[in-house]
C-alpha cells in the first residue's frame, strides 16, 4: 500500500467536484421541505435533468444551454408532482416514489441514441495568476463554473431563508399551513413555486453528473445520489450550511475511498464503497441531535376548508 | 348617534347541506365592545371569517364607516382596519415572536425596528413579551399576547377576538380585560366572541345572539341576566345539574407522591402528586393547559407507568400496570383529545365502543370479538346519552364535537367504573350536551364511584366538584372543599397570573 500516491490538494479539489451534484439537489429539496412538502422524487428529477441537459448540450454544443434545459426538465417533471399533491391532494410519499420510477423510465427513453457520446466540455474558471497559485489556486480557482454556482446557491438559500420576507413566508407555510392560510398567504402557490425550484435544482444536479462529473450518458447513472440528497436534508436539520458540510463530507469520503482503493488498502472494496454513505449519515445523525425539528407541516396535505 | 363603524346587513352564507349564516344584521359603534354570543355551530366563526375576508358571503352587504366593504382576502380587511385574534392561535411554533408578528403585517419594518416597537406596545398595554423568544416555548397566555400585539401594531379600528379567555387563568383574564378597556377608551371597537356569559356581562356594551345561523336577539348584557342570555342562546330552558350532599365512602383511588416524566418535548412532568378520592366523591382539578393535565391522565390510565405504589386503586397497587389491566380493575379514563385519543376518528362507533369496552362488557371471548355485543353496547350509549348520529356504523369523525364527546364519556360511564377520570369533559361542547355530561358524572358519583374531573373551565368545576385542587407546572396545590372558594383563591391555587401586570397607562 502506498499512501504517498494520494495528493491532498488533488483530493480536496476533487471532493468539491464530487460533492456538487448532491449539494445542488439537496438545496432544492431543502427549500421544498421548508415549505412543508416532502418530494421523494429527487432521484427521478435528477436523472431526467441529466438526460435533458446532456441531449440539449450535445445538440446545441452549448453546455450552458444544457444546464438551462436540465433545470427546465427537472422543474417540468416536478410540476407533475405538484399537480398530484397540491391540486389532486394525493399522498406525497406515494407520488414522490412514483415520480422517481417515472423519471428513471422517462430518462431511459429520452436517452436512446445518446449512449457513448461525449458532451461538449464545460468551461473552467481560469484566472491568470490566481489559478496558477500553488495549492490554493488548484482548490479555489480551478473549478468548472457549476462548483461556484453550487456554493453561491447555498449562501443565497441561507440568506433567503434568514433575511428575506419571502423566506419567512416560506418557512411559515412549512411550519403551519393553516395559520399561514388564515393570515392570507397563498399556501398552494408558494408550495408549487418551491416544488418547481426543487425540481430545477435536482435537474441541475443531475446534469452536473452527466455533463461534467462522468461525463457521458448511461441509464440510471445518478445511482442513488437523489436519495443521498434527501437523507442529507433531514440529517442536516434543514439548514443550508449543514447541507454543504454533509455534501463535502460525502464527496470527500467518496474520493478518499477511491484513492484508498487505488492505493491498495487491505480492506475489502465493498466496505470502502459503502463508507461514504455510512460516514456521512453517522456524522449528520450525531449533529442533528441538537433538537432541531422538521418543519411541522412537512408531508401534510393542505386543503383550505373555507 | 354617530355613524356605525361596521354595519352588517342581511349577511348570508350557505355550505352544502347547512346554512351557516342566514340574514344576519347588526351594527358596531366606534369604541363599542360588541359581544357575539352563541352555541357551537351557531355560525359565529363563519360570520367573523366573512368580516375578516376569509370567507365570501353569498349575499348581504357590509359597510365600514358608510363605505361598502367586501374584503376579498385578509390583507384587504387589515388594510381597512380590521384585525383578528384567533381562537386556535394562528402562530408558528418554530419562529420567534418578532417573526410571527412580521408575518401578520402587510408591510413590516426591519426586524430590529419591529422588535423595538413590540417592546413599546407590549409595555404600554401591560403585556410583557420578549420579541426574540421562540413561540413554541411560550405559555398559552403569552401566545395570546403575541396575537394581540400583532393586531395592535396595525392600529386597528375593529379588533375581533374569538374566544380569547378559554386558555387563561382568572388573573390573566382580568389583565386582558384591562387591556381591552384601555383600547376601548382609545376609540377602538371590539367584536368579542364567547359563550362565557359572565365575561360578556362584565365587558361588553351590546350583544348579538346567534342561534342556528340566525340572529335571535340583541341585548345589553349589563341589563340581562346570564340565565336569560343562556336561554336565548339555546332556545329552551336550561337544565342545571342537580346533586345532593352525601357522606363520602372508602378511599377508592390514592396517589402517593406520583412523579412521572413527561414523554413529550414540550410536556410537563408530574412532581410528587398526592391525593385521595373517596367513593361518591367528585374531585375537581383546575389548571391552565399544559400544566400536567395530559400527563396526569396518562399516569392514571396506564399510558404512562410509574412505581407500583404510586397509584393505588381500592387498596391494590397498580402504578406499574398497563391500561388493559387497570380497566379490568375498574379504573377508566376519558382523555381530552376526542379525535385521535379518546376515539379513533375513522372507525365506526361500534368499533370505538369495542376499543375501550371490550373487557368490561364481555365483547371479547377467546380472542374473538363479538360484534353483536359491541353494537348493542354502542346502541345503549347512543340511546342513554342522546347521541345524534344516523347509526352505530358511522365513523366517529362524522359526529359533531358535542355528540362525540357524549359518546366518549357515555362509553366509560356505562362500563360501571369504580373510578372514572375525565380530562376536559365538556371542551367545545354546547351547553345542552355539557349539562347532560355533567349530570352523568354526578350520577356516577352518587352511585358510589369516585370521579376525578380535570378541566380548565372553572364554572364547570365549581358546579360538579366536592373538593377542588389545581395543577401548576406538574405540582398539585392543596386540595380544599369546593364550597365557598372564591375566584381569587382559585386563581392563586392555579399559580397566579404568570407574571402579567395590569396595563399601566
Image (tube, coloured by chain):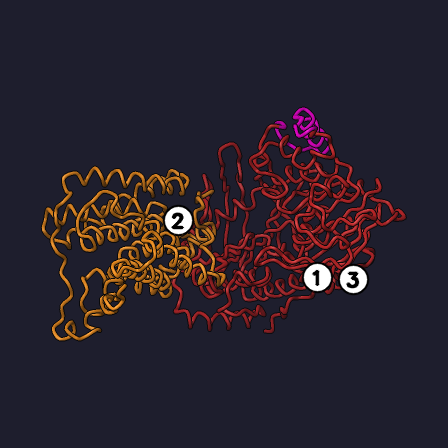
Chain colours: A orange, B red
Q: Secondary structure at mark 2?
A: loop
Same chain? Circles 2 and 3: no
Q: Residues within 10 Å of mark 3 (few under 14, many from 20)?
A: few
**Is B185 part of what is drawn in magenta?**
no
N-terminal label among 1 and 3 = 1
Residue B422 image offset from top left, x and y in percent:
71, 46
Which of the labelled discs sits on residue A37, or is there none? 2
- Magenta segment boundaries in residue numbering: B366-392
Residue A232 image offset from top left, x and y in percent:
37, 56
Q: Chain of mark 3?
A: B
Q: Give the spatial CA distance, label 2 vs label 3.
A: 48 Å
Same chain? Circles 1 and 3: yes
Residue at 59%, 65% in the rendered image:
B179
Which of the labelled discs sits on residue B271, or is there none? 1
Q: Give the spatial CA distance, label 1 vs label 3.
A: 14 Å
User: Camera-side residue: A99 or A289?
Assistant: A289
Q: Is B217 left or right of B449, judged from the image as shown? A: left
Residue pointed to by mark 3:
B478
Amino acid at each position: 500500500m502506498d499512501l504517498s500516491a494520494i495528493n491532498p490538494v488533488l483530493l480536496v479539489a476533487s471532493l468539491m467536484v464530487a460533492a456538487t451534484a448532491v449539494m445542488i439537489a439537496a438545496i432544492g429539496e431543502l427549500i421544498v421541505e421548508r415549505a412543508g412538502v416532502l418530494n421523494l422524487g429527487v432521484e427521478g428529477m435528477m436523472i431526467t435533468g441529466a438526460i435533458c441537459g446532456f441531449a440539449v448540450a450535445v445538440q446545441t454544443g452549448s453546455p450552458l444551454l444544457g444546464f438551462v434545459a436540465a433545470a427546465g426538465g427537472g422543474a417540468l417533471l416536478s410540476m407533475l408532482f405538484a399537480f398530484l399533491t397540491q391540486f389532486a391532494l394525493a399522498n406525497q410519499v406515494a407520488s414522490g416514489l412514483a415520480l422517481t420510477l417515472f423519471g428513471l423510465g422517462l430518462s431511459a427513453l429520452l436517452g436512446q441514441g445518446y449512449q457513448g457520446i461525449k458532451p461538449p466540455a464545460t468551461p473552467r474558471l481560469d484566472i491568470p495568476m490566481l489559478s496558477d497559485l500553488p495549492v490554493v489556486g488548484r482548490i479555489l480557482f480551478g473549478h468548472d463554473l457549476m462548483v461556484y454556482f453550487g456554493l453561491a446557491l447555498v449562501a443565497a438559500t441561507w440568506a433567503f431563508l434568514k433575511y428575506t420576507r419571502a423566506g419567512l413566508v416560506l418557512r411559515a407555510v412549512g411550519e403551519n399551513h393553516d395559520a399561514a392560510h388564515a393570515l392570507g398567504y397563498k399556501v398552494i402557490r408558494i408550495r408549487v413555486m418551491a416544488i418547481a425550484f426543487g425540481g430545477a435544482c435536482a435537474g441541475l444536479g443531475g446534469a452536473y453528473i452527466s455533463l461534467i462529473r462522468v461525463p457521458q450518458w448511461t441509464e440510471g447513472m445518478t445511482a442513488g445520489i437523489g436519495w443521498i440528497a434527501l437523507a442529507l436534508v433531514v440529517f442536516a436539520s434543514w439548514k443550508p450550511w449543514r447541507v454543504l458540510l454533509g455534501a463535502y463530507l460525502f464527496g470527500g469520503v467518496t474520493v478518499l475511498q477511491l484513492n484508498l482503493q487505488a492505493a491498495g488498502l487491505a480492506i475489502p472494496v465493498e466496505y470502502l464503497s459503502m463508507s461514504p454513505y455510512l460516514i456521512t449519515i453517522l456524522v449528520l445523525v450525531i449533529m442533528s441531535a441538537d433538537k432541531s425539528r422538521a418543519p411541522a407541516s412537512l408531508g401534510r396535505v393542505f386543503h383550505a376548508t373555507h | 348617534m354617530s355613524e356605525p363603524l361596521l354595519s352588517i346587513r342581511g349577511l348570508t352564507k350557505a355550505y352544502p347541506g347547512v346554512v351557516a349564516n342566514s340574514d344576519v344584521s347588526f351594527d358596531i359603534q366606534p369604541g363599542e365592545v360588541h359581544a357575539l354570543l352563541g352555541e357551537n355551530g351557531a355560525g359565529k366563526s363563519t360570520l367573523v371569517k366573512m368580516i375578516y375576508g376569509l370567507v365570501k358571503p353569498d349575499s348581504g352587504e357590509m359597510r365600514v364607516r358608510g363605505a361598502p366593504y367586501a374584503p376579498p382576502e385578509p390583507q384587504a380587511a387589515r388594510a381597512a382596519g380590521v384585525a383578528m385574534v384567533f381562537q386556535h392561535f394562528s402562530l408558528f411554533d418554530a419562529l420567534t415572536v418578532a417573526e410571527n408578528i412580521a408575518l401578520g403585517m402587510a408591510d413590516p419594518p426591519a426586524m430590529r425596528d419591529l422588535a423595538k416597537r413590540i417592546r413599546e406596545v407590549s409595555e404600554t398595554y401591560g403585556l410583557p413579551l420578549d420579541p426574540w423568544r421562540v413561540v413554541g416555548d411560550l405559555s398559552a397566555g403569552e401566545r395570546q399576547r403575541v396575537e394581540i400585539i400583532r393586531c395592535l401594531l396595525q392600529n386597528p379600528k375593529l379588533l375581533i377576538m374569538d374566544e380569547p379567555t378559554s386558555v387563561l387563568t382568572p388573573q390573566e383574564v382580568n389583565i386582558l380585560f384591562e387591556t381591552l378597556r384601555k383600547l376601548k377608551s382609545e376609540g377602538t371597537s371590539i367584536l368579542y366572541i364567547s359563550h362565557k356569559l359572565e365575561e360578556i356581562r362584565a365587558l361588553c356594551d351590546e350583544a348579538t345572539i346567534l342561534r342556528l345561523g340566525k340572529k335571535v336577539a340583541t341585548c345589553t348584557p349589563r341589563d340581562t341576566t346570564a340565565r336569560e342570555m343562556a336561554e336565548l342562546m339555546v332556545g329552551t330552558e336550561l337544565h342545571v345539574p342537580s346533586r345532593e350532599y352525601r357522606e363520602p365512602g372508602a378511599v377508592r383511588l390514592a396517589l402517593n407522591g406520583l412523579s412521572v416524566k413527561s414523554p413529550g418535548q414540550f410536556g410537563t412532568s408530574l412532581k410528587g402528586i398526592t391525593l385521595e378520592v373517596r367513593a361518591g366523591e367528585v374531585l375537581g382539578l383546575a389548571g391552565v393547559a399544559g400544566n400536567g393535565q395530559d400527563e396526569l391522565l396518562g399516569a392514571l390510565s396506564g399510558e404512562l407507568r410509574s412505581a407500583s405504589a404510586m397509584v393505588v386503586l381500592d387498596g391494590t397497587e397498580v402504578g406499574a400496570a398497563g391500561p388493559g389491566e387497570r380497566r379490568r380493575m375498574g379504573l377508566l379514563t376519558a382523555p381530552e383529545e376526542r379525535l385521535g385519543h379518546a376515539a379513533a376518528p375513522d372507525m365506526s362507533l361500534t368499533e370505538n365502543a369495542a376499543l375501550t369496552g371490550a373487557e368490561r362488557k364481555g365483547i371479547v371471548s377467546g380472542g374473538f370479538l363479538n360484534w353483536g355485543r359491541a353494537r348493542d353496547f354502542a346502541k345503549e350509549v347512543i340511546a342513554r346519552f342522546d347521541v345524534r348520529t344516523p347509526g352505530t356504523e358511522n365513523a366517529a369523525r362524522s359526529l359533531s364535537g358535542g355528540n362525540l364527546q357524549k359518546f366518549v364519556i357515555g362509553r366509560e360511564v356505562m362500563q360501571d367504573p369504580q373510578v372514572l377520570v375525565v380530562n376536559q369533559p365538556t371542551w367545545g361542547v354546547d351547553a345542552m350536551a355539557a349539562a347532560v355530561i355533567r349530570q352523568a358524572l354526578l350520577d356516577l358519583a352518587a352511585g358510589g364511584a369516585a370521579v376525578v374531573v380535570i378541566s380548565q373551565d372553572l364554572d364547570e368545576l365549581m358546579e360538579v366538584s366536592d373538593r377542588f385542587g389545581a395543577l401548576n407546572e406538574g405540582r398539585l396545590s392543596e386540595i380544599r372543599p369546593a364550597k365557598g372558594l372564591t375566584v381569587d383563591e382559585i386563581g392563586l391555587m392555579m399559580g397566579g397570573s404568570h407574571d402579567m401586570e395590569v396595563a399601566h397607562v
